[in-house]
Image: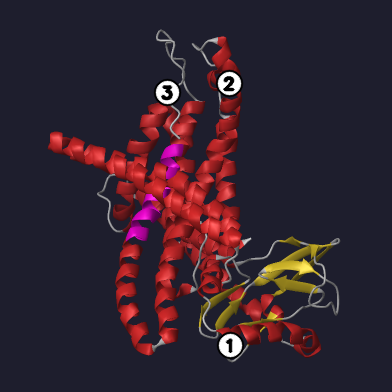
Amino acid sequence: MEAGVSQGLAGIGAGIAAIGAGIGVGRIGGSALEGMARQPEASGDLRSNMIVAAALVEGVALFAVIICLLVAIG
Amino acid sequence: MNLKRLNILTILFLFSLIGFGQNSHESTPQSVASEAPVTQHSAEHKEEGFKIGDMIMHHISDAHQIHFGGSLYMPLPVIIWHEGHLDIFSSSHFYSVNEHGELDYHDYKGYRNHHEMIEFVGENAGHDAHGHKVLDFSITKSVFGMLLILSLMVFIFKSVASKYLKNPKTAPSGLQNMLEPFILFIRDDIAVPSLGQKKAERYLPFLLTVFFFIWMCNLLGLVPFLGGFNITGTLSITVVLGVLVFLITSVSGNKHYWGHIFWPPGVPAFVKVILVPIEIMSVFIKPAVLMIRLTANITAGHILILAFVGLALLFGQKSELAGYGVGAGSVLFMVFMYCLELLVAFLQAYVFTLLTALYFGDATQEHHHEEHGHSDVGHAH
């Protein structure tokens, strides 16, 4: 597909959204692992809460991805 | 047994909608003239080769026919309300399958199928004629998939419920056994912690329906050769789910809920000025974010899987060896993405249901003590 300026900027926007998702989910995973290392018997609880928080953070990042997709397509 | 037969008949009836497609193509000779500009467009498209963007958009968008692969298309009924009259016909009138397995679109009865959106252009309209809006109630691919899932759900849950009613004291077996952990999981880990034991019963039917509907629709979208359903990835379907959550939250909101929105307790007046508009906006934004989260996650997963497949095809155009090499790696990544998408299918259903239960719990909250002067803590966003 021909890439105009708006499509290129949409691509950059999607990349920035990926950075946001990476930082957010990385922090969640990091603190969850740290908690599991301190207290292995809580790892089941920590795992489910980590997954819920990761889904919520990814929701926000994917919101940005949708906006970039809309800019790139239409 | 009669109910089971009724459900089987429902499913068979849905498949008999294929019969709509077997209308005669007597209208195609007249439309050949208007077909010429459109086919020219698609002819030059074929010479340019494989366009990965178009393939991805074709697979994640809704369509008026189901493309099973190659030249196999299943047309779906088109139902249009335009200027006071109802038109029902098969969508096969809009296209003809050419030798490459692609569709050549042409107009029918004044309607034009422009990128799978139907508009009214009048008879013998040119290629760039301005299209007028029509009310489109067609059974499109997503609607067909949704009806399929709904009839499947009715069939499964009716049979499980009748089994529970018939022998309540025996151990569960079969389908009942498979579904019981999930139903108990939603009741005990989602509904009761947010809503409390008494009120959970009122909202449990909606929560269970929403959970299984979203999960099964997500899974249907992952089945490979079935024509690429993307039901929960269509904004029009998730917006209905969001609107339902908004309606139920607002209708079941008691005076504590609305009181906390318009008059947050325990905050000084100047903070109230900022907080109240935000709280009012959040009444609308929370269901909207539910909708976007679900659509975006599912669509993004589909796009990734299709992108890996398309990558192999893209390289295969340059040289066959490159195609095979990239194909081997891309198949591995695609299988990994598929496993991730299976997890995401369940996870998005779980998160939607969990947040909905939290919002319901918020709306039906009891009066709690305000000795700390805190604002509401239940704003999981």
Q: Which residue extends farthest front? A: A5
Which is in the foreground here, disc 3 or disc 2? 2
The residue that disc 1 covers is B47
In this rendering, does residue B245 appear at all?
A: no
Q: Quadrant of residue B43?
A: bottom right
Which is in the foreground here, disc 1 or disc 3? 1
| Horizontal relation, residue B319 to residue B258: left or right | left
Q: If you read the primary sequence from the N terminus, does the residue marked by circle 3 or circle 2 appear first?
A: 2
The residue that disc 2 covers is B274
Q: Chain of mark 1?
A: B
The crowding category of the residue bearing disc 1, from other C-alpha atoms within 10 Å (few below 14, some 14 to 19, many at least 20), is few
| Labels 1 and 2 positioned on one and the same chain | yes
The residue that disc 3 covers is B377
Q: Main secondary structure of the magenta part?
A: helix
| Horizontal relation, residue B300 to residue B103: left or right | left
SS for tag 1?
helix
Q: Position of residue B367 (x, y in %)?
A: 47, 15
Residue B119 among magenta residues: no
Q: In the rendered structure, which segment of residues is drawn in magenta?
A: B340-355
Q: If you read the primary sequence from the N terminus, does the residue marked by circle 1 or circle 3 appear first?
A: 1
Q: Which residue extends farthest top? A: B371
| Labels 3 and 2 positioned on one and the same chain | yes
Q: Where is the N terminus of chain A found, in terms of image quarters? A: bottom right
The crowding category of the residue bearing disc 2, from other C-alpha atoms within 10 Å (few below 14, some 14 to 19, many at least 20), is few
Rendered view: B147 above or below A33: below
